[in-house]
């Protein structure tokens, strides 16, 4: 129901974009954000007090010049204290704004990460298979973290950047409207150049390309690090790992071109900001030529020359806040793209299985959302409870896709998959996952003790049950030989498991779960012949009355299966037992013959290949 409501919310109205979306995220901690905005705006107003105090002091001095003895020292001292109060007030108010903004940022960061992680837990598991961990890592670790930085730092600066120009313009026009207008002309020119830079057609597209190239480089980097053992074994470098090399080059090219595209525009903006006095001086000279009260004019002219640096500092903050906000918005869009990924639909009236037979009924499935290329094309077969059903066939034929569809890593495009006569889409995903244990080729073990890794299958499992599962998976003996036994932490102090050992730990995890349906995708891929036989015996003993589906390339592992389903090019082309399929001839008999021929080949020292009888 949660997914349905989420989808209805998306359908009801499009998600906000740009600065509106940033402010929407910021408003999750409304009270803290408002306090931060008030303190930040107040600090911006107070920051101008020193300039006003100095102007008043200069005016008092010039009024009695050169007879400084007539100067009211107490009034000058009062202006000095006013200037000090402005500096101290600015610091304290801005510090207060940062305290509130940081509290809001930490709360928002926590909420965003929890919501993001919760959403990832509710989307189909196939989404994680397809998108790549590098992109999700970037969104979680960089994009969301930048939002926290925006709320903590850029938001107070943005409020100050909005309030300061308003106060600044009032002061500029209030002291002398003519010289004030000269300053404003320079400011408007800066805004015009900045708007032309941000508004140009390629600016936004270039930012999107920048984010995409960064995500692709992250994905390739994660893949490279995971395969570093292979890279080192073959004495290769990052340059030989083509995908990473290409993504680094593409990112470098993108960043250089992106940076250079802003070079002239930003140089012009900074030059204008630091030279606004060039607009003031000519105006001041013209006004001074016709001034009747030269002392009043001088004090005003000096004030504007002193005030110009404040104009530059305020406007630089505005420029950089806008620039950083543009980068943040691109990251927010990447986060929203993941959040907009449809969640796994949950039934309004969930059902439970009446038995544990699995049936594929004319199932069609496409990884491509356009559905132009189908991975499965009308697949139909039945896997009965209490039997072992093996799925075999050439690589790319659709075997692993079948395994992924059973626990709803993806939903079928057409047809249906039933468990105990009930469509798996009519069951709660949590219920379905309780009914299925699966061991895939890519084994992931947490950096925890071996005991806790096995207990992942069943958090309520006792130490005795864990040990029994380990014995059944043929991994108890090697675990006992480890320094810490079952309490050995995987991945610490240089301790690592071999591929076969990791596979057997994963099998023990599936056994301790004791689910009625077991899906094994190349579960014995790393096992030596002796352990492969022992694991098969363990399955025969421990998985009675369960529905077992084995995906296998090595045909020796499925000879004893109750049913063998041959899949090729997304279709079921043969079904039967090992003996019946051999006697029937066809694709399975050909695969079995080739498998045995390959197993019989060997190589002599002179590199001549011979075939044993």
Image (spheres, rainbow, N blue to C red):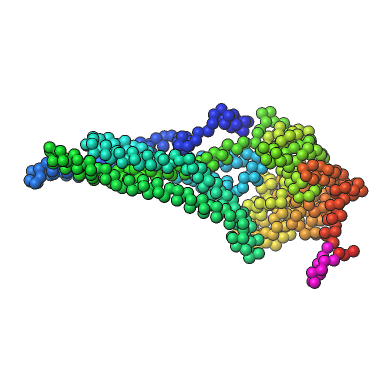
> What range of the chain is rendered magenta?
601-610
Query: Image check: 607 left or right of 146?
Result: right
Percent position (x, y) of residue 113?
53, 42
Q: Position of residue 365 (x, y in %)?
A: 72, 39
Between residue 104 and residue 586, name the one nearer to us: 586
Residue 564 magenta: no
Position of the C terminus, as image quadrant, is bottom right
* Left-right relation of 205 to 165: right
x and y percentages locating residue 227 in the rendered image? 64, 57
Q: Residue at x 85, y 49 (%)?
A: 588
Q: Position of residue 76 (x, y in %)?
A: 16, 43
Give above or below for 245 relative to 456. Answer: below
Q: Nearer the viewer, residue 606 or 283?
A: 283
209 horizontally vs 527: left or right = left
* Residue at 60% across, 59% down: 492
Q: As drawn, which residue projects farthest toward the bottom?
A: 606
Question: Which residue corresponds to the image point at 67% horizontal and 61% vertical from the top-left?
Answer: 482
Which quarter of the picture shows residue 417? top right
């Amino acid at each position: 129901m949660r997914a349905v409501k989420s989808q209805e919310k998306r359908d009801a109205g499009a998600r906000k974009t740009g600065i509106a979306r940033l402010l929407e995220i910021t408003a999750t901690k409304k009270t803290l954000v408002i306090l931060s905005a008030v303190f930040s705006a107040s600090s911006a107003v107070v920051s101008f007090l020193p300039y006003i105090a100095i102007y008043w002091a200069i005016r008092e001095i010039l009024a009695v010049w050169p007879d400084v003895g007539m100067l009211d020292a107490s009034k000058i001292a009062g202006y000095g204290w006013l200037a000090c109060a402005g500096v101290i007030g600015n610091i304290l108010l801005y510090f207060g704004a940062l305290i509130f903004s940081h509290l809001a940022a930490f709360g928002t960061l926590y909420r965003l990460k929890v919501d993001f992680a919760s959403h990832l837990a509710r989307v189909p598991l196939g989404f994680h298979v397809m998108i790549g961990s590098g992109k999700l890592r970037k969104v979680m670790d960089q994009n969301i973290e930048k939002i926290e930085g925006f709320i903590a730092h850029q938001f107070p600066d943005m409020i100050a950047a909005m309030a300061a120009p308003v106060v600044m313009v009032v002061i500029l026009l209030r002291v002398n409207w003519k010289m004030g207008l000269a300053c404003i002309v320079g400011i408007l020119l800066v805004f015009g150049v900045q708007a032309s830079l941000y508004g140009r057609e390629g600016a936004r597209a270039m930012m999107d390309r920048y984010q995409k190239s960064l995500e692709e480089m992250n994905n390739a980097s994660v893949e490279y690090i995971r395969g570093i053992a292979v890279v080192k074994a073959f004495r290769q470098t990052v340059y030989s790992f083509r995908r990473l090399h290409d993504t680094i080059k593409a990112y470098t090219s993108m960043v250089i071109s992106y940076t250079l595209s802003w070079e002239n525009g930003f140089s012009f903006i900074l030059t204008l900001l630091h030279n606004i006095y060039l607009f003031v001086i000519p105006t001041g000279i013209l006004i001074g030529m016709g001034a009747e009260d030269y002392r009043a004019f001088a004090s005003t002219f000096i004030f504007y020359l002193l005030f110009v640096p404040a104009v530059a500092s305020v406007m630089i903050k505005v420029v950089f806040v806008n620039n950083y906000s543009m980068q943040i918005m691109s990251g927010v869009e990447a986060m929203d793209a993941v959040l907009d990924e449809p969640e796994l639909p949950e039934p309004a009236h969930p059902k439970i299985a009446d038995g544990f037979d699995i049936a594929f009924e004319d199932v069609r499935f496409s990884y491509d959302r356009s559905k132009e290329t189908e991975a499965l094309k009308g697949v139909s077969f039945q896997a009965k409870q209490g039997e072992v059903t093996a799925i075999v066939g050439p690589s790319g034929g659709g075997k692993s896709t079948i395994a992924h569809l059973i626990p709803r890593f993806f939903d079928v495009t057409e047809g249906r998959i039933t468990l105990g006569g009930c469509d798996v889409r009519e069951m709660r995903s949590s219920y379905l996952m309780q009914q299925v244990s699966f061991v895939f080729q890519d084994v992931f073990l947490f950096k925890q003790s071996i005991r806790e890794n096995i207990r992942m299958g069943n958090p309520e499992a006792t130490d005795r049950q864990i040990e029994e599962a380990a014995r059944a998976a043929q991994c108890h003996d090697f675990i006992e030989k480890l320094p810490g036994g079952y309490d050995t932490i995987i991945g610490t102090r240089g301790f690592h498991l071999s591929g076969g050992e990791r596979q057997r730990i994963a099998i023990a995890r599936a056994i301790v779960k004791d689910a009625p349906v077991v899906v094994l995708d190349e579960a014995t891929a790393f096992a030596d012949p002796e352990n492969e036989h022992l694991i098969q015996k363990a399955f025969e003993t421990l998985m009675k009355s369960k529905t077992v589906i084995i995906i296998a390339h090595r045909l020796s592992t499925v000879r004893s299966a109750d049913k063998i389903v041959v899949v090729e090019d997304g279709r079921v082309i043969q079904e039967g037992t090992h003996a019946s399929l051999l006697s029937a001839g066809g694709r399975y008999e050909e695969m079995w013959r080739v498998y045995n021929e390959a197993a019989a080949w060997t190589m002599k020292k002179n590199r001549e290949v011979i075939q044993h009888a």
